[in-house]
Image (tube, rainbow, N blue to C red):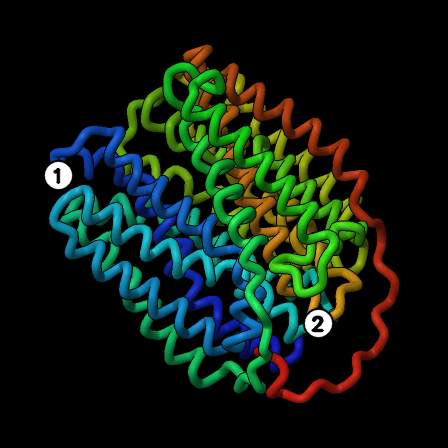
């Protein structure tokens, strides 16, 4: 049973984090509408998503430093305010350029919030019940796919696109008030110098990777100059960043933690599972709309069973993680993900919807079985000051890995023009992930009773 302090911290943070998760899933389905309403070409409107993604990449590496300087509670309240301000500005945008600029403001706030969510809750947990704790952290990611597409479809069907951003405001306001009341006060601020060299390597390196991968879906795929150049530059800059950070104290991101096997294996799995998890999540809404001719709203409703399956298995996967460890659980989950994807690879134009909806329910169930242990195992055996750095490393791995998986399957779909071929590739990637899951740690040792920690230190 997760203790009361962790539940209080989780409640305060999750409400605000829902705004970020809903925003991502809602705006993604609105791009065709924005093309028409803002009278802008697709290449320009695509920057509504790309600009947000790149802002995330710039901000994520500085979260550990900012938390040390400002304090966890203060930083969360600042980030939530920035995200809400960006949402309001987006709703007031007068053309495509202003919308893109305001989405970047949103991305700055969201980039601070996502790793900070894991950090503050894991620090409150103090190494106990990591599976159950991660199940709570993963709640926004589970609810997003359930409610986001449906909410976006309803808004686009009956209301103006500006309401896509006003939806975030109630979550931000309530989340701010809860955080103000429930998060423990910050302790004293630390005088931590900003690693400027590390920032100048990490920020453009991450942006280069994300930008290059975001262009892969266009004609030419990985051979495009606007894919190859930023990808190569990104890899070189991240390599230089890893070398710089590995030999200095006070690093922006302590990459030496990757010597810790649980964190290293978790980060590798978060990256390498991108094609099997996030890539297929790109295919599914496109399949309903393009192969089966459904509207945006109907496609969103048809994806609800996958979200329900994830919601059902979330508490179970947390308990099994604490009891069995990650290795067996993740391998079994990936097998189930692959089996539940096969019906879409075999589906024809007249395949009955009930079978596909049952497959989505099973697939959603398996997604939580996979993602919660993979994310939780990263924090096994870490000391409190190491948790912010682990949160950044796993978030970057997840962000880049998800972009990579989406890009690969987008190229396959464009090259073959066939959803069944793309789904078979997704099944194949899942098989690779089963093998890689053997790198994860096995059953965890019994956790010793933690020493008491002053409440004021929890949010630092």
User: Where in the figure is residue 348, as x and y percent of width and height?
Assistant: 44, 15
**Position of the N terminus by quadrant:** bottom right
Above/below status of 169 relative to 358: below
Q: Is residue 216 left or right of residue 167?
A: right
Residue 184 lies in quadrant: bottom right
At 19% from the left and 55% from the top, the residue drawn is 91
At 49% from the left and 83% from the top, the residue drawn is 182
Q: Is residue 50 left or right of residue 260?
A: left
| Camera-side mark, 1 or 2 | 2
At 39% from the left and 61% from the top, the residue drawn is 109
Regarding mark 2 in the picture, which secondary structure is present there?
helix
**Mark 1 lies on residue:** 37
User: Where in the figure is residue 425, as x and y percent of width and height?
Assistant: 58, 20
User: Where in the figure is residue 415, as x and y percent of width and height?
Assistant: 45, 12
Total residue callouts: 2
**Mark 2 lies on residue:** 384
In depth, the one of 395 and 33 nearer the eye is 395
Q: Is residue 281 left or right of residue 317?
A: left
């Amino acid at each position: 049973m997760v203790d009361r302090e962790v539940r209080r911290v989780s409640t305060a943070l999750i409400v605000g984090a829902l705004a970020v998760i809903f925003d991502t899933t809602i705006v993604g389905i609105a791009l065709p509408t924005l093309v028409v309403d803002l009278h802008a070409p697709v290449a320009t409107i695509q920057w509504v998503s790309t600009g947000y993604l790149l802002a995330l990449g710039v901000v994520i590496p500085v979260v550990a430093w900012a938390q040390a300087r400002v304090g966890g509670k203060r930083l969360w309240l600042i980030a939530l305010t920035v995200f809400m301000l960006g949402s309001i500005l987006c709703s007031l945008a007068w053309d495509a350029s202003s919308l893109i600029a305001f989405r970047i403001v949103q991305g700055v706030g969201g980039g601070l919030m996502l790793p900070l969510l894991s950090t503050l809750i894991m620090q409150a947990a103090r190494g106990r019940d990591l599976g159950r704790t991660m199940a709570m952290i993963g709640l926004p990611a589970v609810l997003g796919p359930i409610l986001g597409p449906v909410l976006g479809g309803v808004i686009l069907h009956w209301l103006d696109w500006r309401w896509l951003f006003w939806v975030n405001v109630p979550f931000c306001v309530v989340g701010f008030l809860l955080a103000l009341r429930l998060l423990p006060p910050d302790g004293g601020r630390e005088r931590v110098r900003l690693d400027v060299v590390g920032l100048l390597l990490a920020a453009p390196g991450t942006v280069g990777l994300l930008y290059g991968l975001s262009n892969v879906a266009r004609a030419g795929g990985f051979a495009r100059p606007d894919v190859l150049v930023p990808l190569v530059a990104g890899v070189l800059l991240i390599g230089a960043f890893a070398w710089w950070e590995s030999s200095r104290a006070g690093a922006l991101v302590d990459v030496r933690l990757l010597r810790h096997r649980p964190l290293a294996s978790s980060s590798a799995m978060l990256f390498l599972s991108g094609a099997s998890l996030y890539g297929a999540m790109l295919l599914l809404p496109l399949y309903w709309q393009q192969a089966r001719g459904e509207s945006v709203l109907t496609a969103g409703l048809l994806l609800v069973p996958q979200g329900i399956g994830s919601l059902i298995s979330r508490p179970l996967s947390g308990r099994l993680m604490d009891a069995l460890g990650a290795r067996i659980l993740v391998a079994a989950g990936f097998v189930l993900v692959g089996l539940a994807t096969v019906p879409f690879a075999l589906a024809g134009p007249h395949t009955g919807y009930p079978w596909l909806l049952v497959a989505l329910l099973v697939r959603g169930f398996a997604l939580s079985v996979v993602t919660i242990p993979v994310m939780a195992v990263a924090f096994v055996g870490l000391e409190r000051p190491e948790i912010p750095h682990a949160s950044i490393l796993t978030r970057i791995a997840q962000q880049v890995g998800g972009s990579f998986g989406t890009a690969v399957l987008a190229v396959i779909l464009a090259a073959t023009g066939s959803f069944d071929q793309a789904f078979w590739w997704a099944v194949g990637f899942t098989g690779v992930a089963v093998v890689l899951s053997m790198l994860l740690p096995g059953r965890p040792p019994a956790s010793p009773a933690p020493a008491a920690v002053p409440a004021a230190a929890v949010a630092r």
